[in-house]
Image: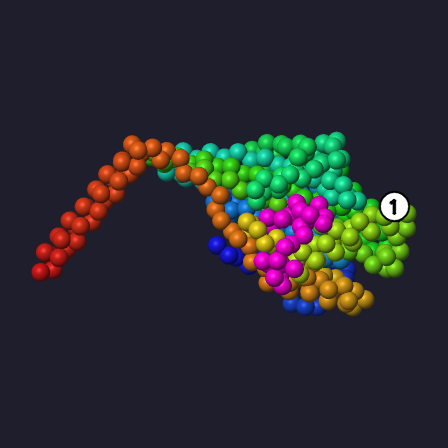
Amino acid sequence: MAEYMRVTVRIRPIEPGQTPFLSFDNATEEVFVATGKRIVEGCVEGYNGTMFAYGQTGSGKTHTMLGAEPIEQGLYHEQNRGIIPRAVQHLFELLQEKKSKSAGEFNYVAHARFVELYKDELHDLLGPNNQLKLRDYGEDVVVTGAEERQIDCTQDALNILKLGFDNRKVGGTAMNQHSSRSHAIFIMNIETKETVGNFTTKRKSQLNLVDLAGSEKQQSARSSGERFKEATHINGSLSVLGRVIRSLAANPSKYISYRDSYLTHILRNSLGGNSRTVVIVNVHQNPEYASDTISSFAFAESCSKITNRVKVNEDLEGDSLTAWKEEVKRLKGELIAAHNNSKLGKSITE
Ligand SMILES: Nc1ncnc2c1ncn2[C@@H]1O[C@H](COP(=O)(O)OP(=O)(O)OP(=O)(O)O)[C@@H](O)[C@H]1O
Ligand SMILES: [Mg+2]
């Protein structure tokens, strides 16, 4: 099924607490309800999903995805939480609800990996490996060498997120005191198994929750040394992302060079592939950044033209001859009952 990538825009107030001059709702809960809920609900049904925040440095991407500073506020505080903690909580609530309401037997298992792309290297945020690799398995791209943690509930996920965000590269720049110096990608793989009667349905999905580093104009950021090198890599990978997005929007049937950056390679399925994808474009309302805002809107416009090829990832088991025979017998019974009822209805009205 073809499905457009969805795009939403969030405007950062000039000063925290100030209402943006445009009438966009500024609460993370609103952004989550409008964008994230459906993605998470899809993951429970076997659809891959991706949410990522895009925008210039200081525009509020980490505030949107992780939540307010410091990390503990962002992860644990009901009102200050970002999209990522809200998404994992919603995911486990849905899985547990499904387990308690299933007509048969429903079980799930979820695993997480958390990686960052820092200066063109893939680092594990949950372990020591700083030389992770990407492997293509058919349409899927898998990060190899990263620690994988089993997650049973929201609290497990929050603990993993805390560990990862503590390890993430953050540094002060002239534009943002706590600037993200890497692209952080939280990857969850969810597998469910539901048995009703003789049939077992297995579903699997991947949920990618991404907080990108922001583009920086070297002049405004006044960065030097290590910060300058980081910014060069950040701008490089973001320009590949922009190019891939523009190519997909213009002509998706043409060859798309996802492999020009780890960022686009890891997100290949999310960009024009088998995934429901939401992009939150963050902009700064300060007129000083008008040209960055215009280019972020151009990025948003290209994203909104991209269609993904979304499909449910499921396998039906129990399709042995006996199971099918019994299903045919059951359906025949229903058909006969419906037929008899309609005859009865007819004779009553006659
Ligand atoms: N909607 C908002 N309401 C209140 N404060 C916000 C909002 N968005 C961002 N901020 C504040 O603005 C500052 C910069 O935000 P943030 O770190 O999220 O930007 P960023 O886009 O992640 O930047 P970078 O690309 O440098 O990592 C932070 O102090 C953050 O708390
Ligand atoms: Mg950030």
Residue at 67% x, 50% y: name it: 258
| Dot 1 amino acid type | Glu
Taking the image as shown, residue 197 lies to the left or right of residue 289, namely left
- State which quarter of the image contains the C terminus: bottom left
Residue at 74% x, 38% y: name it: 123
**Count of numbered circles in the view:** 1
* Residue in front for this viewpoint, 216 or 144: 144
* Residue in front for this viewpoint, 196 or 34: 196
Residue extent of the magenta highlight: 247-270
Residue at 10% x, 56% y: name it: 347
Task: Kindly identify which residue carries mark 1.
Answer: 226
Taking the image as shown, residue 250 lies to the left or right of residue 216, namely left
Q: Is residue 314 above or below residue 23?
A: above
Q: Position of residue 105 (x, y in %)?
A: 40, 33
Q: Is residue 96 visible?
A: no
The image quarter in which residue 248 lies = bottom right
Q: Is residue 278 above or below residue 186?
A: below
Q: Position of residue 218 (x, y in %)?
A: 86, 57
Q: Position of residue 199 (x, y in %)?
A: 36, 36
